[in-house]
Amino acid sequence: WDIGLCEVHITADVAYAAQRYGEVSGDEAFLRDHAARLYRETARYWLSRLTYEPAEDRYSSFFVKGPDEYCGAAVNNTYTNYLARNNLALAVAQGKLEPREREEMEGVRQRVTLLYDPKRDLFLQDETLNRLPPFRKQGDTPSYKSVCFDRMQRYRALKQADLVLLMTLFPLDFTREQQLSVFEEYEPITLHDSTLSFGAHAQLALRLGLWEKAEEYLSKAVYLDLRDIMGNTGHEGVHMGALGAAWQAVVFGALGVWSQEGRLTVDPRLPPGIRRVKLRLCHRGSWYLVEASKEGTTVQGEG
């Protein structure tokens, strides 16, 4: 019950998904007729869910759990707060608000708590993670199959990517140094007890040029079911989310495809194990053939 009720980041995730769809598709009718209302109503949720702390003049999130899913219900999960802040920004910019409500949302957005250690140039997952004792995992079988789930909530161990995922969702918001700090801090304590974790780690490792880690995680994401890596394919079925994460690792990580403010960019980072990547993609109604290899990169419009 606690996971389902406190993973409220999903509300802001839906707004983010609408944002990315609008960016890549250029679907003005969707943005005008549907997204604006979605942004407005989900932002109103955050006005009711965040808690104002007068002493610090900030808004905090209590009893929340990020994509990690372990580490109990925390205070100020950075993934949750960052997505909530983005959700509020979308509403302020496109939500068709009355001036008073727009001003209120912008005031909250500016004061959403983001835990950050300037000495290490590191974003912190939440306020309690570092107080928990460590846990060591053996093999790829999910830990919760052998350890009481309640006990897993009280270890300094992540079920799957949390801040690593955040770095991939907003690749232009963080410096390479901040992305590397997150990877070096949280990757060693991530157990990958979720099939969704390998692809996100592969994507960020590819962007950072950590070739050994990138190829290890990409291989696990691609062959998760084919080789039954986690021993759960037979009774759980094919893990489509993990396949999607592997696809994202190749397209957004290895090829470096991204769209920002209507502009399509390609910035390949191919590890030694990938000689060539070629695919067709549609951006704002136009089709492109993208090909990258050690010799160079080509992007050809197909009309």
Image: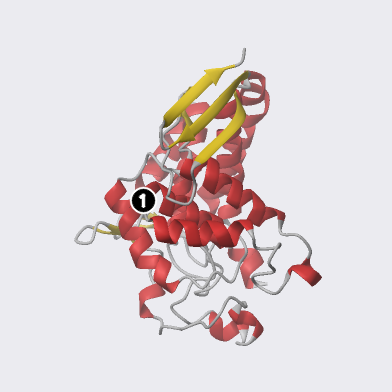
Camera sees residue 80: no
Quarter holding residue 210 = bottom left
278 or 87: nearer the viewer: 278
Q: Is 259 above or below relative to 255?
A: above
- SS for tag 1? loop
Image location of residue 217, percent across then percent down: 51, 60
Q: Is residue 210 left or right of residue 217?
A: left
Please tell me whether residue 8 is drawn above or below residue 139 in the rendered image: above
Q: Amino acid at mark 1?
A: Gly
Locate the N terminus and report the quarter of the image it occupies: bottom right
Q: Residue 206 location in percent, x, y? A: 43, 50
Residue placed most toward the observer, 224 or 57: 224
Res 110 quadrant in image? top left
Categorize mark 1 by other alpha carbons within 10 Å: few (<14), some (14-19), many (20+): some
Q: Residue furthest left?
A: 119
- Image x and y of residue 96, in percent: 56, 26
Which residue occupies 69% across, 69% down? 228
The quadrant the C terminus occupies is top right
**Residue drawn at the location 30% of the way across and 47% of the way down:** 176
Q: Which residue is mark 1?
A: 209
Q: How is the image coloured?
A: secondary structure
Residue 194 lies left or right of residue 85; in this view the side is right
Note whether residue 14 is visible: yes
* Total numbered badges shown on the rendered structure: 1
Q: Position of residue 86 (x, y in %)?
A: 46, 42
- Measured along the vertical axis of the image, is residue 163 above or below residue 106? below
Please tell me which residue lies in front, 154 or 204.
204
Write the residue at 47% across / 81% down. Answer: 155
**Residue drawn at x 48%, y 65% as measured from the top left:** 62
